[in-house]
Amino acid sequence: MSLNVITTPRYGFAPGSQPDVQLAYADWGSPNTPTEATIIAVHGITANLRGWDALAEKLVAFGFRFIAYDLRGRGDSSKPTTGYNLALHSFDLAALLDYFKLPQANIFGHSLGAAISVYFAAHFPDRTRRLVLLDGGALTPDDAKAAISRSLDRLGKTFPSLPEYLRLFRGSPYFPVWSENIENYYAYDARVNPDGTTMSKIPPAAIEEEWNNLMLTHQYLAVLHTIIKSPTLVLRATVGLLDDGKAGFILTEAACQKLLAAICQNAPAKLMDVANTNHFTIMFEAAPEMVQELNEFFR
């Protein structure tokens, strides 16, 4: 691969799978990058495309093209009143590939984005070259909602200013080291009103519908694992979000082993435990050993 790379992303909007849905995207790397070196990244339940900044910059340095986008209802994408489920997200992802004229791509999902990626890989096997599941994609643990409660609690609340909004996350135990990438991620999530008050761009009703639909269908993920045909890499955080890191795993070790065994029925699958990372820092820190594993896997 060439190392003559474009490190500044191009921002734009692509049509989703329904007439009233536009998807905001960031596109790193050369538009001339071959399909086999193109990565489409799908974020988590209350996340946005800026969460991928660190990983995108490091993978683009290896010659990849990295496209991240805001799910419907998040970031700067359209926010329809309803339509938040794995199927519609997968149709949006297919529409994004159509927009970029990609017959297939490497699909890279985190958290809810990993579940969407599983659904997509199972239903669109010809469009999924390789699949990466970043701390997600298996059955949701009972304590998952408590574990991500800080991400959910901000929705629908009004804060006096953007600095006050950011201070909520600066004090989070989930981020032992604050960084510019984390600040940019939450600043992008924020909607600053004319009077300076600030709130998340995400409508709470969208996440409530999303969560309810996920709980209704998450058992179906176990079925989908058995029909995935794409080589798969699972990256698991080793520090939980509860009980001083001993609990609150979004992807538990037991669920991970079942996931791997199911996928291996039809496709090669491997696991990498990413040391000293939790569900959030596994993205923001972009550990060199994980980036190297991704580089080798996508090649």
Image (spheres, rainbow, N blue to C red):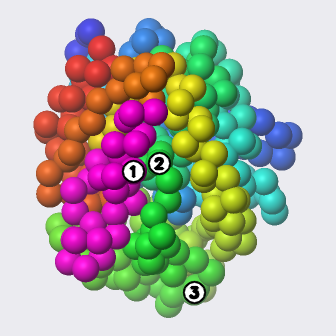
Q: Between marks 2 and 3, how big is the CA–CA gap?
A: 33 Å
Q: Between marks 1 and 2, how big is the CA–CA gap?
A: 6 Å
Tag nearer the camera, 2 or 3: 2
Residue 156 appears in which quarter of the rendering?
Answer: bottom right
Name the residue type under label 1.
Ala
The residue beneath circle 2 is: 138
Q: Above or below — where is 264 with respect to 287? A: above
Name the residue type under label 3.
Thr
Q: Are marks 2 and 3 in contact (CB under 8 Å)?
A: no
The residue beneath circle 3 is: 158
Q: Few, some or many C-alpha atoms within 10 Å of disc 3 (few <14, some 14-19, many ≥20)?
A: some
Q: Above or below — where is 29 with respect to 282? A: above
Tag nearer the camera, 1 or 3: 1
Q: Nearer the viewer, residue 202 or 260?
A: 260
In the image, the segment drawn in magenta is 236-262
**Identity of the residue drawn at 50% across and 53% down:** 139
Q: Are marks 1 and 2 in contact (CB under 8 Å)?
A: yes
**Identity of the residue drawn at 23% across and 38% down:** 272
Is 243 on the left-hand or right-hand side of 100?
Answer: left
The residue beneath circle 1 is: 255
Choose the circle earlier in sequence order: 2 or 3: 2
